Image (tube, rainbow, N blue to C red):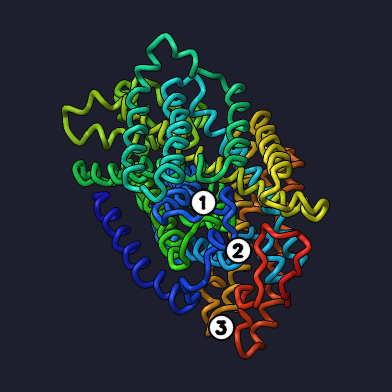
Amino acid sequence: MSVLYLMLGSLCVFALAYRYYASFIATKVLMLDDRNIAPSISCNDGHNYVPTNKWVVFGHHFAAIAGPGPLIGPVLAAQYGWGPGFFWILLGSVFAGCVHDMIILFASYRHKGQSLSVIAERDVSKLTGGVTAVVILFIIIVALAGLAVAVVNSLFQNPWGFFSIAMTIPIAMIIGVYMFRIKPGAVLSGSIAGVIMVCAAVFIGPYVAESNIAGWFTFNKNQLSVILPIYGFCAATLPVWLLLAPRDYLSTFMKIGVVVALAVGLLFVNPTIKMPFTTIYTAGGGPIIPGPWWPYVFITIACGAISGFHALIGSGTTPKMIEHETEIVMIGYGAMLTEAFVAVMALLAAVSLVPQDYFAINTSAEVFKKLNMTVVDLPALSKLVGLDVAHRPGGAISLAVGMAHVFANISQGLQHTMKYWFQFIIMFEALFILTTIDAGTRVARYILQDILGYVYKPLGKKDWIPGVIVTSALVSVAWGYMSYTGDVSSIWPMFGATNQTLSALALAIGTTIILRVGRKKVYALITLIPCLFITVTTFAAGIMNVRTYLSKGQMLNVWLSVLVIVLVVIIIADNVRVWLKLLKTDKPPGLNDERDVIFCPIVPADAPPDLML
């Protein structure tokens, strides 16, 4: 079967979902109204709260949420066949992931840009707020460590990739100064200049790699493991308009541009799907993912359909930049749909490879030998990319090979360019991840400030510079240490399950939000149904992971995984208690925006708390 049927079919589903389902949620459920003053305006401090053009905010939000999940997850899930992954991306993103992102972004916007833990404390209870803060901080540090390891593995001993990505930092700062200080609102001219400079950095990269200064941009794994936390610290402390927003915005052009180019390439090449609808590994025992398709397809694909990490961005940097409430639809629902399309493209690139070659790339030599398979096109592909790509598990290499193969086959004359496409895609994947690290570090800093604010009130103020520096340093050191001493195999499995568990937690809080603002209580089903499904699925995966950790004697992972599950059970149970009370009310009590006086997060920490049930 041609991949075009799946690609065009997914585009139609996403377009219909955005036009009708997103509009229904915006107008009937949340009743978005631009008369509600944005926190970027009411709390504008020129540092964290900055009114920003909606396209720049979309770029930042998409770049921050679109980490390795939509690229790597679908590639690994292709082990089960193209069917389970494809339909979960479609249904999961439309009815779970996009709803999740949109509701949490709305809640944070109405709560003046506060974090998910503060929202939980105000609209559920202090118990849920405190437990949520602990769970989120743990998950985000583990996530950042895992992301950092992935970047290190992509950029070590790679001067081309390091140079090109490093150049996006000064380029973003130049564009930030231009768009926010020299000529405020000059989005078009700033975008054009920024994109040209970023593209120039990409094309200059191979010449730098072959020059006498290549050593300046060549680092080993340990050196990169120190450089990345330093960068994360800088990104978390500098004003959002100077580095974070313009860099993520410009990176989005590359991200979306490559995905669109891949879609166009698929139209020209029109490859066939070589992976079956389901494989013999759906019941378990697979060479890449040992567990059965349920629950592991849903855990592995992660951000491609739904991710709890998105709730951290949606209640972190993004709500502090939005100018109008109705932009929540485009930024919350639209950015997640865009990420889902990225996941579809990644899956199609993987399943267009011959299955034997796919498994040869994504398994070790020892494991592949046991499969009794013979490679088909892999020797020729390795020769074209100038690298032996066999037995490089993790998903990144097989995705790069699949995408490069599509680009190089647009025309016979492009066959010799496959090695350039391959290196470009590897750098593209690293850029995808790095933009999540900078936003994630900043969000973790916000959460840590919320927690430490109970110990020492000034630390809770987002505009108190000493507190900003201390908390940014603590967060950067924490995930930097984990990435320096750990690896993907020790970090990523735990993150996969806990990340999806966080999405169940966020959907539970989202159900509480809808019961507070929705005109009809039945509207709460739009978050309750996916909440129940994700909760059961992630708990099943968590229990299976615990059994695996026990068999390997990894007791620390066992206790941490069990702790997260127990804490999330407490949060969901507390939400159920609040739901039962809200279901008895005649009218929705509303959120904090209906109060006569609304306190911004930058006012003294002894401001009166919001009404709780």
Say which of 200 and 81 sits in front.
200
Residue indicated by mark 1: 302
Residue in view at x 53 percent, y 84 percent? 519
Using the numbered discs, state the Cα–Cα distance from disc 3 to disc 1 in whole angstroms. 29 Å
Q: How far separated are the C-alphas under marks 3 and 2? A: 25 Å
Q: Which residue is mark 3?
A: 521
Dot 1 crowding, Cα within 10 Å, few <14, some 14–19, many 20+ = many
Q: Secondary structure at mark 1?
A: helix
Residue 573's x, y, as percent? 72, 70
Lower position in the chain sequence, tag 2 or tag 1: 2
Front disc: 2 or 1: 2
Q: CA distance from mark 2 to mark 1?
A: 28 Å
Amino acid type, mark 3: Lys
User: Which is nearer the eye, 555 or 208?
Assistant: 208
Amino acid type at mark 2 = Lys
Q: Nearer the observer, disc 3 or disc 2?
A: 2
Q: Secondary structure at mark 3?
A: helix
Q: Bin the neighbour count of mark 2 within 10 Å (Cα to Cα): few under 14, some 14-19, many 20 and up.
A: many
Q: Judge left or right: residue 118 versus residue 533.
A: right
Name the amino acid, label 1.
Ala
Give me the residue at 57% from left, 35% from top: 148
The quadrant in which the C terminus is found is bottom right
Q: Nearer the viewer, residue 358 or 107?
A: 107
Please name the residue shown 58% across and 31% down the image: 228
| 501 horizontally vs 70: left or right | right
Q: Secondary structure at mark 2?
A: loop
| Crowdedness near tag 3: few (<14), some (14–19) or many (≥20) residues, C-alpha within 10 Å | some
Residue 368 visible, this orientation: no
